[in-house]
Image (cartoon, rainbow, N blue to C red):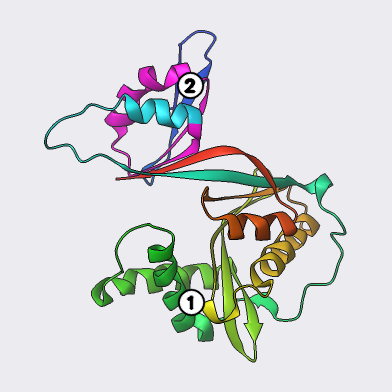
Amino acid sequence: CDRFHVWPARDPVALLYSGPSGTLIPAGDPVGGPPLCEAAERVGWRVLVGDARIGQALLEALPRGVFRRRPGVREQRFMAVEANEVRDPDRAPPPGFRPARLADLDTLVEFACLLHVEDHMGPPIARSARGSVQARLRETIERGETFVMDRDGRPVGKADLSLRSHRRGAQIAGVYVDKSTRGQGVASALVGALVRMLVREGLPGISLHVRADNERAMAAYRRAGLCDRGPWILALR
């Protein structure tokens, strides 16, 4: 319970969850953003993600100063589908859809580094820093949480699962398609296959968030069966 901060203390209308890895998730009435700002600063966060209205209100209330670096903020859309909304969940997966293997690791590291730049997360990742990307992907592959679309034995698209819970549902992240195969339905096939697989596992719903200006990705996710649920925000510092 100490990871949840609510406002006001009685009959709360807004809350803030602070995760152990430095992630903040605000929810509720935007009027609660400024009062929850003190709790946000106290926990020393790295990433804020959640509903855009209260998230923006919280960020605008952060203390300002000459030496304070302002968080980088990205407008996103929250896309989701509930299990009972998924059409034809028993449809066979498309050719090439499979769990990633360790033999794919080098290709997937390259995809992750390209995604970092294309998704406006920061400058290109230096060679010296790629070891951490490789270690993270190795873990997700070994846990069975990275999936690919394969063409002629080589991945041309990838997606990770950042959450896979029978109680809370699943969240898809890190979707990337090789430039040489874009416009061929790889992203929608990959995400759609993941959605149906997760529904068959009994998960209650699947979600992801995507840059608000990435119209092609949003169209692909709509074809995969997800619906736009509203404005989202991602802030990094």
Identify the residue at horizontal 71%, vertical 51% (top origin).
226
> What residue is pinned by disc 1?
108
Identify the residue at horizontal 52%, vertical 14% (top origin).
12
Looking at the rendered image, the disc whose residue lies closer to the viewer, 1 or 2, is: 2
> Percent position (x, y) of residue 181?
60, 79
User: Which residue is nearer to you in this view: 81 or 4?
Assistant: 81
Q: Number of marks in the image?
A: 2
> Does residue 98 appear to the left or right of 36 in the view shown?
right
Residue type beneath disc 2: Pro
> Which numbered disc, 1 or 2, marks the residue that appears first in the sequence?
2
* Residue 135 seen: no
Q: Residue furthest bottom?
A: 152
Identify the residue at horizontal 64%, vertical 72% (top origin).
183
Magenta stretch contains residue 195: no
Identify the residue at horizontal 15%, vertical 30% (top origin).
65
Vertical position of residue 44 compared to residue 160: above or below = above
Which of the image's four quarters has the C terminus?
top left
> Does residue 220 appear to the left or right of 60 in the view shown?
right
Magenta stretch contains residue 25: yes
Q: Which residues are magenta?
A: 24-52
Res 30 label: 2
Vertical position of residue 108 compared to residue 220: above or below = below
> Percent position (x, y) of residue 211?
50, 51
Task: Compute the Cα span from label 1 to label 2.
Answer: 38 Å
Image-quadrant location for residue 150 = bottom right
Q: Residue furthest top?
A: 10
Instruction: Please report contact status of discs 1 and 2: CB closer than 8 Å, yes or no.
Output: no
Residue type beneath disc 1: Leu
* Residue 48 seen: yes
**Helix, strand or loop at mark 2:** helix
